[in-house]
Amino acid sequence: MKKVYIAAVIVAGMALSGCATEVIRKEPKEVVDLSGRWNDTDARMTAEEMVKSCLETAWLPTFNKEKGRDPVVIVGTVSNRSNEHIDAMVFVQDLEQALVNAGKVKFVAASPERGEVRAERADQQQNAAVETRAAMIQEKGADFMLQGTINSVKDEIKGEYAILFQVNLELVNMTTNEKVWIGQKKIKKLVKRPQYSL
Amino acid sequence: MDRPEKDQEAGQASAVFPLNRCWLIIPSLLFLSSCAAMSGPRLQPEITGLVASDQVKLAVDKIEATEADYGQGNYLLYYLDRGLVEAYAGLHAQSIQSFEKAKRRFEELYTQSVSKEAASWIGNDYALPYRGADYEYVFVNVFQALNYLASGNVNEALVEARDLDSKYQVVEKLAAGGGNRRFEDNGFARMFMGFVSEATGRPEDRDNARIFYQQAEAVYARYYGGGYEPQVLKERLNAVSGWNSGDNRAVVYVLQLAGFAPVKEQLFLPVPLEDGVVAQVAFPRFVARPFMAHRGMVTAENAAGGSVRASTELGVSIADLAVKDLESRKALALSKAVIRPALKYMVEHKQQENIQKKFGRPAGQIFGLISSLYNIYSERADLRSWQSLPSEIRVARLALDPGKYHMRFEHLSEDGALVGTEELGDINCLSGQTYFLVSRGRR
């Protein structure tokens, strides 16, 4: 009988321990794929690889030689044309970070951020000490705009699907509309779901 | 054993209960455990009742506070109801979150638990998590798209269109292998996604709209045997199949959500087995919930007193889809309903014989009585369904010159009598833009 009680206590203990919430801290750079959906790792890796590819092509030294300075780049819209709800802003911010960290281009704030900065600058003209006011009409204009799309193709059959995410980015000359760089990054994932579990 | 000495001395007959309480405990435990999962969420009628009486905010408060009341196996059902009630209340951001949880749960439920399946053979189908019907799966995309449209985000609504399309592709592959096509019967979902695609104004989306319309036309033709197709579908298919006509009027789509989807009720059939054991077979059927507003008329009035009117036409009868969906699964449900009591009886009969041998005939008879009670009580048809869905979705399309309009909706009975009016608010229609409005009056 005693053995039965001990066994019951062990089983109850196991059951209760199974109910506890477990939190595991992970390094942000660590790859964690839970569902096969587009995730933070995809956004970061794609941004880093595509910006690297962009800055290694001929348009950059050509511009440096012609103008004698680093180009000014702005990140425009990245449209989500996939079949998942993707927060494109996370990807845009990763692109901006990769561009700034590369140190080869100057980078200016995008349209929504500029609005807030302009409002603050206008406010400074009224309220800040003269020597600390940011000057008006001194914004740096962008030479190029980076814009693109995130697309996906899903091929699914019972319990298994392959999904291809394709990110297309283009760097467009603001003066001439010339596309000076076109990049493409593909991520393919195969997701298998078991039909039965215990 | 730890039996009291007195019992040991009293002989076999008096030793029955203390010695082997377990034979009473097992059916009792089964009985009690199945009690907890004997029925679907009792809260559902109350929630739909609150929505029907235009107390949607109260319905949201109620459902948001009572996740546990829906039961452990009804996580999907809870988020389907919650998402739709939140959408009815205009809480689109919350509704989007709820429907996303429902979509994830749909995916998780692909994996079936063998132990829960086994439990459903001992007790009833409430031991299984609610997996949702095919037709319900489609409406998550439709209502999620409406949420995004109400939030002014047509691009995210298009994500729902693409997601729906990928589901249809899976079904087509399954159908090619002889699978069930119930999921695909919803021509309205494809037509609606065509409206959404057209709404972006982009040429590539116009082409996608044409494909959605063509698919919708094929589904309507198959479903109604060529007997019905919404007029708006014919018009849109003609419009997007030709050159862009250059019509820069604004477009307003009004979706009328009429009534509530049918609810399931169970039918019992008592089955006497040998040795006086009684079992019963239970299976579900859908019962329609009556409603008055079967038609609708939309009026757009501008400041100058001019007005444009359009009546709604049937997009989809969810009541009809639900019945057909259940019919398609009837053979499986019936065979399970028949086999389950027989299996239970076989197991219990064997146990009854063992008890009778060990403890005498009265003990066996008591066990038989408890088993019969358990069989009758535990045999329940699965009555779960997404009850907050409307019974019908009807649609009207108005093409309006740019300007400000006040939108009014008249709910009409089947013979055209006015049932009630609903103010849908003001819209400042811009040239070439598309707007989506929902009338959720369900008198």
Image (cartoon, coloured by chain):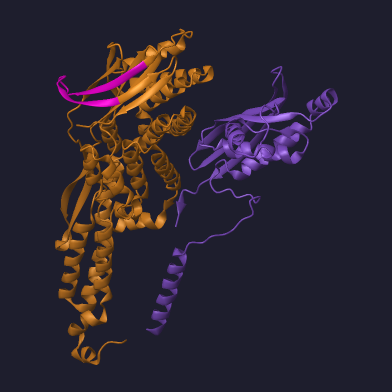
Chain colours: A purple, B orange
In percent of width and height, residue B42 lies at 24, 50
Location of the N terminus of chain A by quadrant is: bottom left
What is the x, y in percent for residue B267? Answer: 18, 46
Name the side, left or right, on which A6 lies relative to B224.
right
Q: Main secondary structure of the magenta part?
A: strand
Is B408 included in the stretch rendered in magenta?
A: yes
Residue shown at the point (64%, 54%) measured from the top left:
A27
Q: Is residue B62 above or below residue A54?
A: below
Note whether B239 is above or below B441 in the view shown.
Answer: above
Q: Quadrant of residue B60?
A: top left
Residue at the location (55% across, 43% down)? Answer: A36
Q: Is residue B267 above or below residue B239?
A: below
Asked if one can make out residue A104 in the rendered structure from this viewpoint, the answer is yes
Instruction: Tell me if B240 is positioned left or right of B305 in this view.
Output: right
Residue A170: in sight, yes or no? no
Residue B264 percent location from the top left of the image: 23, 42
Magenta region: B404-424
> Which image quarter: residue B133?
top left
Work out which quarter of the rendered image holds the C terminus of chain A and state it. Answer: bottom left
